[in-house]
Image: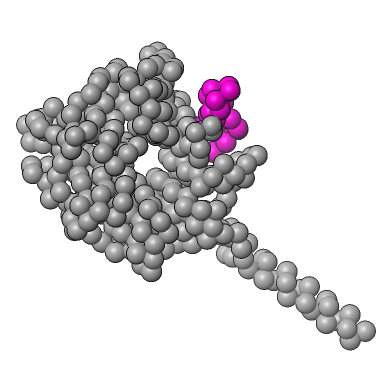
Amino acid sequence: MKKKVINIIKIVFLIIILLTLYSCEGEIYSPWEIIESPVNNALYAICALEKNDIFATGYIESFIKYDGSKWYKLETPKLNYEYKGVLFEDIFFINDNDGWAVGEGILENIGVRGIIAHWNGTEWVDATPKPYSDVYPLMCIFFPTPDEGWAGSEGGRIYHYVNGEWSLHDEFPANFYSIWFNSPTDGWMGGDPECLLHWNGYFWQIYYYNPGAINCGYFDICFPDSDHGWVLWFSYLQGYLISAIYHYTKDEGWKLDTPDIALQGGFNAISFSNYNDGWLVGGKWSYHWDGNTWTEVPVPTLYDKAGLNDVFAISPDDVWAVGDWGTILHFTGWK
């Protein structure tokens, strides 16, 4: 009888623990951990070289780095012109001494123009091609090799980095938001209106283009390997932002995948550590891909208007997400 009572007590104690974890004052338990941030401004992009070497950025005052123990603030990039309202939309690192960030700022009497900043190992410096007035707002960047890079802009300009310099490569009637390269001869660029371009090593060819698709397009691209890729599709429908995922295979091309999550609202970023481990974030939601299906993963309580803007999956047990108000989340495995 005594042993039975002890077992009942153990069961009750276990139930109390589970209820505490999963429903504390109405909050749902989340495997995401909120990390102390050195900045209060929005973070829009994150890039990891390895688990102890990670960079993130957003507004010009929000360049930060993680060294394996904490996040700390880097010096503000040194820009050659006086911009107002500067923010950076994307970031890419080749190694710890060679990183790039692209964004936009307002030039007096000219308007919104693009900015490219380069990390040389000690500081961020201006690398925007001249004339500055001709550079459109830049939204995405990728380097398939240390000596060759690509960037896409609103307004449809494609910039190419080769021989140590950036220059205008081509123009297309779209706004480019995402870019990914599997190799120097296999690249993808997406934007709006619905537009997917493919780089074959010689030129950007149209894979899909629907100029009549108003306020909808492709927002973020990620390939865990050259045979499989995912891209986020978005649309503003009657004032609401909705999203869906397209999955790419070499045999079938791009196909709609799990459109039911569109009911959750707009998503901003997607990242994979391998084919069986992917993450999707946006707003106050996150989803995980296990190789077969997408499953919602609760996000911890954030500020009232805070949303997640980017995610980077280093490994299945090491994933980072950043967002508004300097939000930093870290996933270290299923607890």
- The residue under the point 26% across, 45% down is 100
Is 313 drawn above or below residue 181 in the view shown? below
Which residues are drawn in magenta? 241-264
Is 274 drawn above or below residue 198 in the view shown? below
The answer to which image quadrant residue 209 occupies is top left
Q: Position of residue 207 (x, y in %)?
A: 43, 18
Is 193 drawn above or below residue 45 in the view shown? above
- The residue under the point 49% across, 62% down is 33
Q: Position of residue 297 (x, y in %)?
A: 57, 50
Q: Position of residue 200 (x, y in %)?
A: 38, 22
- The residue under the point 65% across, 39% down is 292
Q: Is residue 231 something one can see in this rendering? A: yes
Is 44 drawn above or below residue 167 in the view shown? below
Q: Is residue 32 something one can see in this rendering? A: no
Residue extending farthest bottom: 2
Pick the residue in front: 277 or 37.
Answer: 277
